[in-house]
Amino acid sequence: MKINTPQTICGKWAFGGFLSFLFFMFVFFGMIISGQKGGTGFFDNMLLTGPFLIAVISAFIMFLSALWDLIISKNRALWVWIIMVIGGFVTWFMAMELLFPH
């Protein structure tokens, strides 16, 4: 089965952001499984903060790229919709965490 990737420039950026997001989340969870521990603050353990921060930035970029591709380029590919929803959820959760920390 062939995976059809988006053909527009914004769609390719969104798909690349999606792959980057997945990679850095796997790196983040792999480091947790290997025994890395977080501290009391977000920047206490930079080995965990780095991959997670890059994954969140990738999710934000993939959300904006997919949204731009859907609105401006009128690309209706299934991958673009899936990427936009995932990026939107991550962007929403991170925005709420920054606005209303617990």
Image: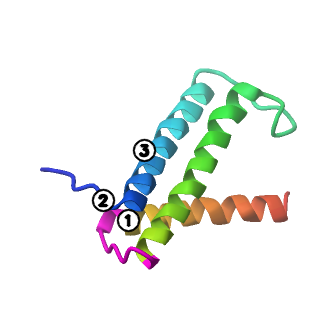
Mark toward the start of the polypeptide (3 vs 1): 3
Q: Name the image quarter holding residue 60.
A: bottom right
Q: Amino acid at mark 1?
A: Val
Is residue 88 in view from this perspective? yes
Q: Are marks 2 and 1 in contact (CB under 8 Å)?
A: yes
Where 82 falls versus 58 (above or below)?
below
**Quadrant of res 9:** bottom left
- Give the Cα separation between the discs numbered 2 and 1: 7 Å
Name which residue lies at 42% across and 47% down: 16
Residue drawn at x 44%, y 76% as measured from the top left: 72
* Direction from residue 57 to residue 10 in the image, left or right: left
The image's mark for residue 19 is 3
Check whether the beta carbons of the residues at disc 2 and disc 3 lie within 8 A of each other: no
For residue 37, say whether it is visible: no
Observer-nearest residue: 13 or 4?
Answer: 13
Instruction: Name the element at disc 3.
Output: helix
Q: CA distance from mark 2 to mark 3?
A: 13 Å
Q: Secondary structure at mark 2?
A: loop
Q: Which residues are magenta?
A: 71-80
Q: Can you tell which mark lies on residue 80?
A: 1
Residue 76 lies left or right of residue 28; in this view the side is left
Q: Which mark is residue 6?
A: 2
